[in-house]
Image (cartoon, helix red, strand yellow):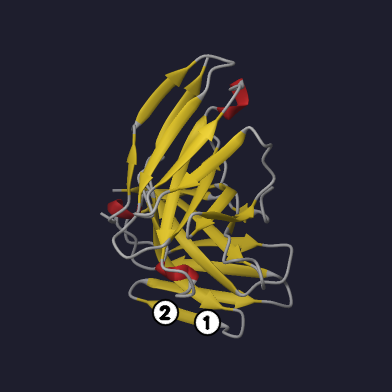
């Protein structure tokens, strides 16, 4: 078990709604990344936050947005949900500049959009 | 988009046999890592190999990297039922903020 937690574990929404997913970083980690994993696929990078600012973004539309708080926890917000947003959403935390192998993933939030 | 392909997509072997899976990627990398994922849950880091390394060992794991072919392989020796999982390679690129780009994964089933 890593020290990264995510909530909720499962969520069901309907198309057009908005959703907020939460991630609590491992103690001492100041960088959080979010990934989307569709069924049967590998995770895809959404964005990364460092010291409360977005620090890199993947190929996702602006309706995917995020926040990082002073305690380094983070939120992923998705507006105007589409059926294709159904996926496992993973967050990962690490201490910046300590190398990618120090990144720890949370258990994920499984989102189903109907 | 995915960085590349992993093959095979699925692999079933008897307990005690060795399992080999391969990963190909498209762009220059700093590092390549292998992760394990059980039943669609969180990812567990297994091993990292740097772009200037060719082979690395950790317990029952052996990883090779061929940067000229942009490919890597993961060997799991003396497999156990607990090794049943999906395995993903992930790369990070130079100047890429250590953002990870994952492959499509190999689903490994160990038959007791």
The image shows residue B12, relative to residue A15, as above or below, that is below
Which chain does the residue under circle 2 lie in? B
Q: Disc 2 on helix, strand or loop?
A: strand
What is the CA distance from the residue labelled 1 to the residue labelled 2?
A: 7 Å
Left/right placement of residue A11 relative to residue A2 reads right
The reply to whether callout 1 and callout 2 are in contact (CB within 8 Å) is yes
The image shows residue B98, relative to residue A106, as above or below, that is below
Give me the residue at 35% from left, 44% from top.
Answer: A107
**Residue A108 visible to an observer of this rendering:** no
Q: Which residue is mark 1?
A: B55
Q: Nearer the viewer, residue B11 or B69?
A: B69
Which chain does the residue under circle 1 lie in? B
Give me the residue at 49% from left, 39% from top.
Answer: A76
Q: Nearer the viewer, residue A31 or A107?
A: A31
Q: Nearer the viewer, residue A68 or B96?
A: A68
Are there few (<14), some (14-19), or many (20+) residues within 10 Å of tag 2?
some
Give me the residue at 38% from left, 55% from top.
Answer: A72
Image position, residue B71 (x, y; %) = 66, 68
Q: Which residue is mark 2?
A: B57
Q: Nearer the viewer, residue B111 or A21?
A: A21
């Amino acid at each position: 078990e890593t020290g990264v937690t995510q909530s909720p574990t499962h969520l069901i929404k309907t198309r057009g709604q908005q959703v907020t997913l939460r991630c609590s970083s491992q103690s001492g980690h100041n960088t959080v990344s979010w990934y989307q994993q569709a069924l049967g696929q590998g995770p895809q990078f959404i964005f990364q936050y460092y010291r409360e600012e977005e620090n890199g973004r993947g190929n996702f539309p602006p309706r995917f947005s995020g926040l990082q708080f002073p305690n380094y926890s983070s939120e992923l917000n998705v507006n105007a949900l589409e059926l294709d947003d159904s996926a496992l959403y993973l967050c990962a935390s690490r201490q910046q500049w300590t190398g990618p192998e120090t990144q720890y993933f949370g258990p994920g939030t499984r989102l189903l959009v109907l | 988009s995915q960085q590349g392909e992993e093959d095979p997509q699925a692999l079933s072997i008897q307990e005690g046999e060795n399992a080999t899976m391969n990963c190909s990627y498209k762009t220059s990398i700093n590092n390549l890592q292998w992760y394990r994922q059980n039943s669609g849950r969180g990812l567990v880091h297994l091993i990292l190999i740097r772009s200037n390394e060719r082979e690395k060992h950790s317990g029952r794991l052996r990883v090779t990297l061929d940067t000229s072919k942009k490919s890597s392989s993961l060997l799991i020796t003396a497999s156990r039922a607990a090794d049943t999982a999906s395995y993903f390679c992930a790369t990070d690129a130079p100047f890429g903020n250590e953002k990870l780009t994952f492959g499509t994964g190999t689903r490994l089933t160990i038959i007791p």
